[in-house]
Amino acid sequence: MSELDEAYQRVRLSGPERDGWLSNHAPMAVEALARHGHGHAVHRWLDGYADRLEDRPRGIAPIAADEWRDPLGDPVRTGDWLDYFDRELADEPWRQVLARWWPRLLPGIAAGATHGVIRVGHAVRALLDQQTAPRIGELGHGLAYWAARWQPLAPPGAGPYLATDPRTALDAVPRVPDQRFGIRARLAQLADLPGWPAAAGTVPHSEEHASRETTADEDAVPARLAGIVHAAVVRHGTHGYANPVMLVHAATAPNAVLRILPALPATLWADSLAAAWAATAAVTAAYAPATGRPAPPAAPDADPAEVMQHAVDSAGPHAIKFADAALDAYATTSDTTVLAASVLVP
């Protein structure tokens, strides 16, 4: 059994949250560590995180297959959702379960400050690498967490909007006026934010194909998502100082969707792109400062291996997840700016 499967076994009886609403980052962090060659550090990292784990919540009443709408978004039913997806994944192949539930869950992409989709993204990447029982179980936990915390964003506008690149689109996202409270209070303000419909509806194009892409161009979706991830990582280097932990999710949420695409029917890709961009725009609106700071210098000879090692040394789960996203962005762009930005997260 691999270090990752052993880690999944260790946390399988833990709940998706602690202290009432804080996300359990263990399954996401250990997958990122194993992915980038730090499997040897997985158990040591889990030992240090163990006091943040809480027991898996008990169910209240079973959720029937045709009665899933009412408990959707009800965190009190988290135990029921965990039991539900245990049954679903025991009876059907995981890809079929994912394809059926993806369009149901996608409109609530803000679930758990986007940790629902992020956790599913890590699980799917692990399953695409190797299908094992612990990985299927972890996918069920991710889907259950997403369902229990399902939270839609204020809807985007219908457009049409002028084509724009990801960085320009991020710069155009308006800020919510009251940034004193948590993410739920901040996201609630999007409905009354005048610039939100246009910001959320202007799904960026990848720069090299902006003249010919449309939202429905399925072949372009992976490149467009990768462009959003790259832009969000780079922007974190200039704007992340305001809230370095929460702004991480502007990059890790669309990166999760990008990882899940290969396991989904292509007919679901366009909606996935639109939802991923809305999540990035929402996190940006909620936490980005009004002005940026100079970006950290990018070293032409930077070593990508040092990025994850720095995150391992910090032991912070957000540092590990952000380094993971930065390394993905570097792999597609060779832009050392993302490596410099990645070390700013505690």
Image (tube, rainbow, N blue to C red):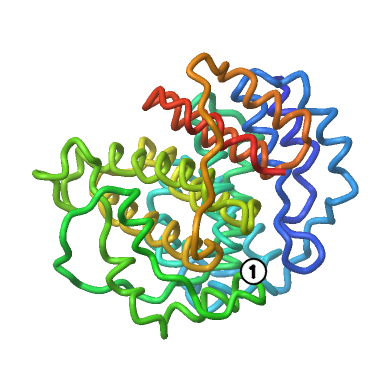
Return the residue nearer the eye: 147 or 20: 20
Left or right: where 43 falls relative to 133: right
Q: Quadrant where the N terminus lies?
A: top right
Return the residue nearer the eye: 334 or 265: 334
Q: Is residue 101 visible?
A: yes
Q: Find numbered disc 1 in the image and state the secondary structure of the residue it sits on.
A: loop
Task: Determine the residue located farthest toward the front in the rendered image.
Answer: 294
The residue at 87%/43% (across/down) is: 50
Return the residue nearer the eye: 210 or 105: 210
Return the residue nearer the eye: 2 or 227: 227
Q: Which residue is identified by label 1?
A: 62
The residue at 70%/56% (across/down) is: 23
The residue at 56%/39% (across/down) is: 122
Type of amino acid under label 1: Pro
Give the x, y percent position of residue 79: 71, 64
The residue at 72%/66% (across/down) is: 21
Query: Looking at the image, is 228 positioned above or below residue 200?
Result: above
Query: Looking at the image, is 90 positioned above or below residue 334?
Result: below
Give the x, y percent position of residue 29: 68, 38
Give the x, y percent position of residue 73: 56, 73
Q: Quadrant where the C terminus lies?
A: top right
Give the x, y percent position of residue 273: 32, 52
